[in-house]
Image (cartoon, rainbow, N blue to C red):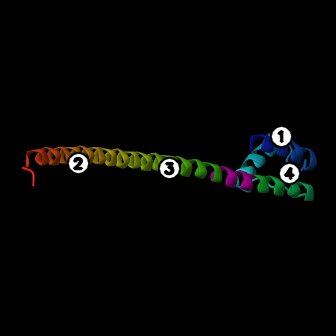
Amino acid sequence: MFAVAVVAAFVVTVIDKEDFPNFGTAAWWAVVTVGTVGYGDVVPHTGWGRVVGSVVIVFGVTFIAFLTAVLTSLFVEAEQDEHRTHVESLQQSAHDETLRLLNELSDRMSRVEAALRAEKRTLPPG
């Protein structure tokens, strides 16, 4: 945005000396215009000055929209990463709990089988 403002200030100073008698005034106008503030204290009155102004306005609005989209995307991505990490943690906890329960059941089954074998040995035949 800074580069566009400097270039626009230089160009408008060259093509519209009446409205922009010095670089400082042109730079002020370019920064205010590219930032989409538009105070209106300095404005181009010539056709070419308005063409430059239109380009600066379109660039400023586009850049601010792009910047907003990028920042929003970064925030959304960070939130999604946090959510994904949380879900993965929950899934891992559920997996660990499932394995623990399966191991507990396996141990119980082994004890039941051992008890049944022992009982079978102690029963009289027939």
Using the image as rendered, state which of residue 94 and residue 53 is in the foreground: 94
Between residues 36 and 75, which one lies in front from this camera angle?
75
**Residue positioned 92% across, 44% down in the render:** 14
Amino acid type at mark 4: Asp
Q: Quadrant of the C terminus?
A: bottom left
Q: CA distance from mark 2 to mark 4?
A: 93 Å
Answer with the quarter of the image where residue 107 lies.
top left
The magenta-colored residue range is 60-68
List the residue tagged with mark 2: 109
Q: Amino acid at mark 1?
A: Phe
Tag 1, which secondary structure? Answer: helix
**Residue 67, percent across and down?**
66, 49
- Residue 118 shown left or right of residue 41 in the figure: left
Q: Residues within 10 Å of mark 3 (few under 14, many from 20)?
A: few
Please report whichever mark, 1 or 2, sits nearer to the chain's N-terminal start: 1
Residue appearing at x 33%, y 49% in the figure: 98
Mark pair 1, 2: CA separation: 89 Å
Which residue bears the numbered disc 1? 23
Where is residue 30? Give x, y as percent: 78, 47
